[in-house]
Amino acid sequence: MKIGRVYITGAGPGDEKLISVRALELVKQADVIVYDRLGAEKFLKYSNKECEKINAGKQPQNHRLNQSQINEILIQKAKEGKSVVRLKGGDPFVFGRGGEECEALKKAGIPFEVVPGISSFYSVCAYAGIPVTHRECASSFHVFTGHRVDNGELDYSSIAHMEGTLVFLMSMKNLHIISEKLIQQGKDENTPVCAIQWGTTSKQRSITANLKEIAQKAEQQNIGHPSVVIIGDVVNQKMDWQKYRPLFGKHIVLAGSGETACEAKALLQQQGAEVTIYSGIEIIENIEELSKEIQNLKQYTWIFFTSVNSVEYFFKAMKKQKKDIRALQGIGIFCIGEKTKQAVEKRGIFVDRVPQQYNSESAVKDMEQFLKKEDKILFPASELASTVLEKKAKELGVTMVRVTAYQNQINTNGIQKIKSDVKKGNIDVIAFFSSSQAKNLFLLLGEDIKKCQLFAIGEQTQQSILHMEAEVKATAEISTGKGLAEKIIKVLKNV
């Protein structure tokens, strides 16, 4: 069997935007991902469904796998001919044991590649507005691990007299020892220090004090692991550039999927928010019945599409029946929503009607304007789609054949992390892109979901949230990803 390759890969410091293009490319293609707890786990959602995910789970005093076990897994999976990504927070060669893993792979004859990552030692400082070097006060910087300080690893007599900026990683447990030893060895006790926890993420917070008081003040403010500690006059140059990103510090969950959710995510990230897309729905294809109707398309005068998924599965059924767009000649196309319209038109078909507002209520009013009693409508949809259009068609004396093209099931994959964050109060906003998303997330998260501010993409989604006895903070005026994002931004800016 052909031997696979291992990619020792840096995932960056935490902000999802700070992973490299190459690293994300590898995550998407991987057969196996061996990942660390910090800075890496959030990227698993980009992997394919068949990818095996192994949690190396390193955290203080609790190593899920020790280093020799990790090395053995990398070697074994590569020997199975698999593409293995070892996904590590920050940069794999900056206190990340990436060098040890490369040595083990080389000894075993396993080909490997190293993909650098943005290290926390400078990126976290940058997000706190502190430059590690500054022409007026620091022309050099020195980086240390504060993880083990009593075993002779650090020469405090030398460190205390170093010029420039001192940066300590993994140091919060031993911060009082570090500060005491530096002062004992001659470092000025009034040297400014900043401790930054959860740097580059929505949970980022920091405390600034002098060297003598920093450990006590950090403890009082509950600044704990993971943190970066920066010591030196550059701390006095601290610039709060994050205040120009009005949503920085906010963690927003978008309960949706596809291009609509991605559009909203991009807009919210521009404003500084940390954004997680999570779909509470797993789509299951069900095109057998639809395929039968496609065999008799000529009997229909209209096709109604109310979602991108309905478009995708309709044309998949068309392909299965070996039919192309010529089979749609003479049939009108009605779409609700700009994204749905785009999904049709990218196939070279012009859409005949789109209601002024992207919801069923507006569609019902529009139906009165163009339908005739002799019309017959094919309506491919999910089993949970609203019956409003069918009721209106019946009222108008028009035949509508509703066909289930796909089914919605509750998606539990990855929900535990969101559930934990909601319970801890680490999520500020949940925005729902459909009634189904709202119903499923309420089932998955329970009453804790009411701790978050809840937003709805449209009237129907709003009613579903209210039906579950929860407060809706606001509803989008235009039922699109952009419209929902703009509503969230407007509300949170004014809070």
Image (cartoon, rainbow, N blue to C red):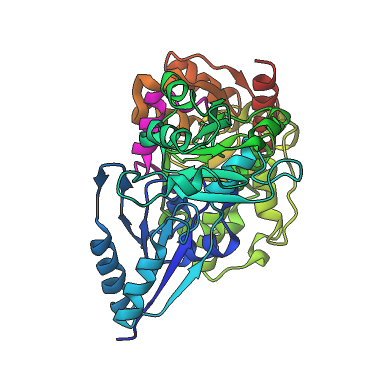
> Percent x, y for residue 425?
43, 23
Q: What stretch of residues is rendered in magenta? A: 403-430
The residue sitting at the bottom extreme is 1
Residue drawn at (51%, 42%) of the image: 160
* Nearer the observer, 245 or 478: 245
Q: Can you see residue 308?
A: no
Q: Is residue 454 left or right of residue 69?
A: right
Q: Quadrant of the N terminus?
A: bottom left
Q: Is residue 407 left or right of residue 130?
A: left
Which corner quadrant holds the C terminus? top right
Residue 426 x, y percent position in the rendering: 45, 27
Q: Give 216 or 421, whichever is nearer the viewer.
A: 216
Q: Is residue 390 left or right of residue 444?
A: right
In the figure, residue 354 lies in which quadrant?
Answer: top right
* Residue found at x 55% / y 50%: 142
Res. 433 in view: yes
Vertical relation: 110 (above or below) 293: below
Percent coordinates x, y for residue 358 in the rendering: 67, 33
Give how far across and how far down residue 260 sits, in percent.
62, 43
Question: Is 425 colored magenta in this rendering?
Answer: yes
Q: Looking at the picture, does residue 91 appear above or below residue 425?
A: below
Viewer-closest of 215 and 195? 215
- Residue at image x 72%, y 58%? 349
